[in-house]
Image: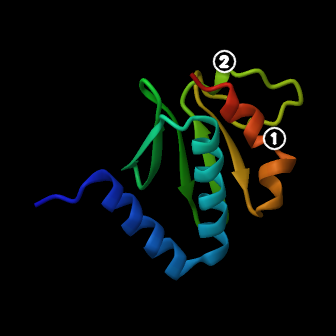
Amino acid sequence: MDKLPEEKVAAFLNELHQSDVKKFEIVEQCRSLFFSLHPNGSERMMYGGIMFSLKHDVAGVFAYKSHVSFEFGLGHSLDDPNNLLEGNGKLRRHIKLQTIEQIKKKQLKFFIAQLT
């Protein structure tokens, strides 16, 4: 029997905690921030990371070798007055995080709050 989405997320987080506590803490802060702003949102494992959904998929958080990336599926449409979003694709934008402090410095809350 397949695992439920929340079991897959829990398994991913457990594995990340075992392998890299620093990245685990960044991912947990990102999740906490998302759900504090969107308590009716949901999450599931996809593409090797956690996808966040409201009415549809809106963002995801992914742990890479040297950083954590918070990615916005329609990031091109987000207000970004300080040019903090990275990427120049047609739709997607992301923020690379290497420390917990960068979550605030790179204004992640500002961008997550814009998701609908």
Compared across the picture, whether 6 is left or right of 66 comes to left
Q: How far across and how far down the image is residue 48, in percent?
A: 41, 55
Query: Count the marks: how many?
Result: 2
Residue 40: x, y in percent?
48, 34
- Measured from the top left, where is residue 19 in percent x and y? 53, 80
Report the side of 97 relative to 64 (left or right). right
Residue 42 image label:
none
Q: Earlier in the sequence, mark 1 or mark 2?
A: 2
Instruction: In the rendered view, tell whether residue 48 sits above or below residue 55.
Output: below
Q: Residue furthest left?
A: 1
Toward the viewer: 42 or 40? 40
Report helix, strand or loop for mark 2: helix
Q: Amino acid at mark 2?
A: Ser
Seen at 40% across and 64% down, the residue is 10
> Label 1 vs label 2: CA separation?
16 Å
* Residue placed under numbered mark 1 in the picture: 107
Pointer 2 residue: 77
Quadrant for the C terminus in the image: top right
Q: Image quadrant for the N terminus? A: bottom left
Q: For this view, does 4 lie left or right of residue 74?
A: left
